[in-house]
Image (spheres, grey):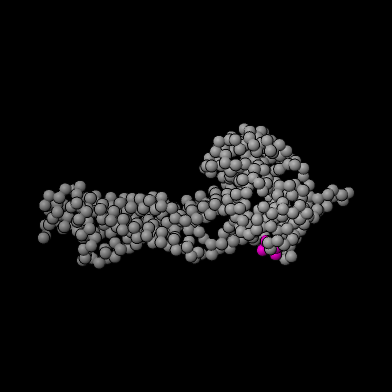
Amino acid sequence: MFELFVARRYLRAKRKQAVISVITVISVLGVAAGVMALIIALAINNGFHDTFQRSLLGATAHIDVLEKQVDEGIPNWRDLTAKIQRLPRVTGAAATLYGSVFLSGPLQPAGCVLKGIDPQSPIQRADVLKVLKAGSLDDLDADADLPGIILGSKLAQETGMRLHSRLQVISPQGEMTPFGPRPAYFRFRVVGIFESGFYDLDKTWAFTSLKQAQRIMSLPDVVNSIEIKVSDLDAAPEIAREVERITGPKLSALPWTEKNRQILGAMQLERTVAVLTIGLIQMVAAFNILITLIMMVMEKQRDIAILMSLGTRQEQIRRIFLYQGFLIGAIGTTLGLVLGYTLCYLGDRYRWISLDEAVYSVAYVPFESHWIDGVWVAALAIGISVLATLYPARAATKVAPAEALRYE
């Protein structure tokens, strides 16, 4: 194509004014820097979002059925669980019992959330086995005199507990005395250590059997939550509404999106701010392209006049400079994509940036690049580059051949 050939020659040719060549290189680097920064920022955001979702939903429910007002638990949980399991898109449902207790270990005591589960429930069994680092889930009820408990890895480390060691569980919901409730003490054996990769879970959670959790909390055969797994995470709010039609007015179904609304909203806001902020780099690169082409039009007035005298149409002159902006944007975008995806791969593989788990819940910055991000980032960068050429391309068509060649 004639216009593309001329545009490529103009970009490669040595010019009398070296400053134009320098600005052209700066424009390419500006586009590359913007694309690279945006790819890395999106990869970090995707990494935190996907790690959070994978780690948290791997150990918790997609939908929780809870009491609207804390009362005495859910007494008819068996029938209710069976009804929920028959709903479309529900892959499993199981009853659980949560409660706050204290663990007395050899190093120091620590508070934790004790979760009573049914070791025979397929979804609860799969959730625990997925994160189980050591020990066996089958040992939770193996010894009736000394029941089993599974600790989070950080919780075990904090209390000094190891696999098969014995610990004391202290429940504040003990016997009632004339002087108020008295804590109850229970002996357990550590039969497993789990590690979900999510710091808050690994530091504050422990599992035992549902029967033992009811005993510790001095409760009859009741639960305070029914956990539901679904086949489509995005449809969890819709499925939750279907669940509420079965559970009745005293219970509510809380999808994972609602439970984690604050952190998900913060991640979305962070993503939006990153795109807008780093987009300013693209705007700077666009201004560089604009200046480059304006200066090039001024330098190439004689060439433009000759081309127009030879019969080149104004539309063809316009396309020459449009193609120049497109080439600058395409080269910079390609360079930025290669650098961005390469740095993301290396950063995630070698875990370049370490984090404080107590603050960020993960040990390092995860980079997860999605190919769809590269598509729209590339389209945005090239689109802005082409838009920056509209004025210089229009100015090039206004060159009068007679005036430009008068003194030649």
Q: Is residue 185 magenta?
A: no
Image quadrant holding the C terminus, namely bottom left
In this orientation, which residue lies closer to the viewer: 68 or 82?
82
Seen from this angle, which residue lies furthest right?
178
Does the rendering let one see residue 381?
yes
* Residues drawn in magenta: 156-161
Question: Which residue is depicted at the point 62% across and 41% down?
Answer: 93
Question: Which residue is depicted at the point 51% across and 60% down?
Answer: 365
In this orientation, which residue lies closer to the viewer: 134 or 324?
134
Q: Is residue 67 left or right of residue 286?
A: right
Q: Main secondary structure of the magenta part?
A: helix
Does the rendering let one see residue 170?
no
25 lies above or below 229: below
Q: Is residue 160 magenta?
A: yes
Residue 397 placed where, x, y %? 20, 50
Residue 109 placed where, x, y %? 74, 61
Q: How many marks?
A: 0
In this orientation, which residue lies closer to the viewer: 32 or 18?
32
Question: Which residue is depicted at the point 74% across and 54% down?
Answer: 143
Residue 16 placed where, x, y %? 21, 66
Q: Is residue 230 left or right of residue 293?
A: right
Residue 235 placed where, x, y %? 53, 40
Q: Is residue 165 left or right of residue 4?
A: right
Question: Which residue is depicted at the point 26% across and 64% down?
Answer: 21
Give residue 9's quadrant in the image. bottom left
